[in-house]
Amino acid sequence: MIEVKHLSKRIGDVQALDDLSFKALNGQITGLLGPNGAGKTTCLRTLFGLLQPDDGVAEIDGIDVRKDPIAAKQQLGLFPDPFGLYERLTPREYISYFAELSGLSKAQAKDATERAIQMLKLDDIADRRCKGFSQGQRMKTALAQAIVHQPTNVILDEPTRGLDVMSTRLLRSNLQQLKEQGHCVLFSSHVMQEVAALCDQVIVMAKGKVVAVGSPEKLCEMAGETSLEEAFIKLIGSDEGIAA
């Protein structure tokens, strides 16, 4: 479980996070939905320890990220930009490298890498160099790296950005599988279709604050609208920076 309690963060003249609080539960896919500049990426970077909040607490499975960052990160998988793979490495080498970075021994990393390869059906490309991979192959390799150490929680920042339709469908299927296995999946997006298709819970953000929380259906009910897009616009009071 991921919990954020009264997080605040100012970056320059911008109040990126403003007393932000929410929970993302195990066995659910939770979406951070907001226009560009809402604070979604700042929130996720704070959860992963890349940014320090000015105030408030971020916890991963009850572990304070600021007080014990190593223990917190061991329970967290971060889905990287799939276009940033080390192209000279094979998926097996790439995944194993990150398994060892997560604290696994060489023997443990070998076993964990094989599990991730089997789970994401990477057998046929596991020993080919990543250079020249399709979008779908890159995406699966990047996701395998995020889950190789079997974290309880997985974080994704705008995960379908730059992916084609088939790769996006494949990623959605993989995230549903993680949910069914009991993982907490938290991702940010400004794409309505993506959030409506995937999320059990949606946290609507604007100007660093939580505006509303609920399932897509609940948000529509709260706003008195039939579509998530119209509900979102009514809840934040603007249609700037969103995509259908």
Image (spheres, grey):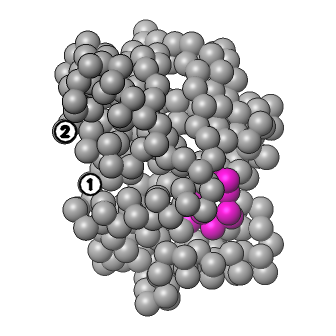
Q: Mark 1: which amino acid?
A: Gly
The answer to whether residue 217 of the structure is visible from this angle is: yes
- Where is mark 2, residue-wise? 244
Residue 35 numbered mark, or none: none
The N terminus lies in quadrant? top right
Q: Quadrant of the C terminus?
A: top left
The residue lying at 47 percent from left, 81 percent from top is 121
Q: Residues within 10 Å of mark 1 (few under 14, many from 20)?
A: few
Side (left or right) of 192 relative to 46:
left
Does 13 appear in magenta? Answer: no
From the image, state whether disc 1 or disc 2 is nearer to you.
Answer: 2
Horizontal side of 62 relative to 176 (left or right) equals: right
Question: Which x, y percent locates residue 93?
Answer: 58, 78
Q: Is residue 98 visible?
A: no
Tell me the number on the disc at residue 162: 1
Name which residue lies at 71% across and 68% down: 100
Whether 157 is drawn above or below 143: the answer is above
x and y percentages locating residue 164 in the rendered image: 23, 62
- Helix or strand or loop: what does disc 1 sit on? loop
Kind of element beneath mark 2: loop
Span colored in magenta: 145-153
Q: CA distance from mark 1 to mark 2?
A: 15 Å
Q: Quadrant of residue 231?
A: top left
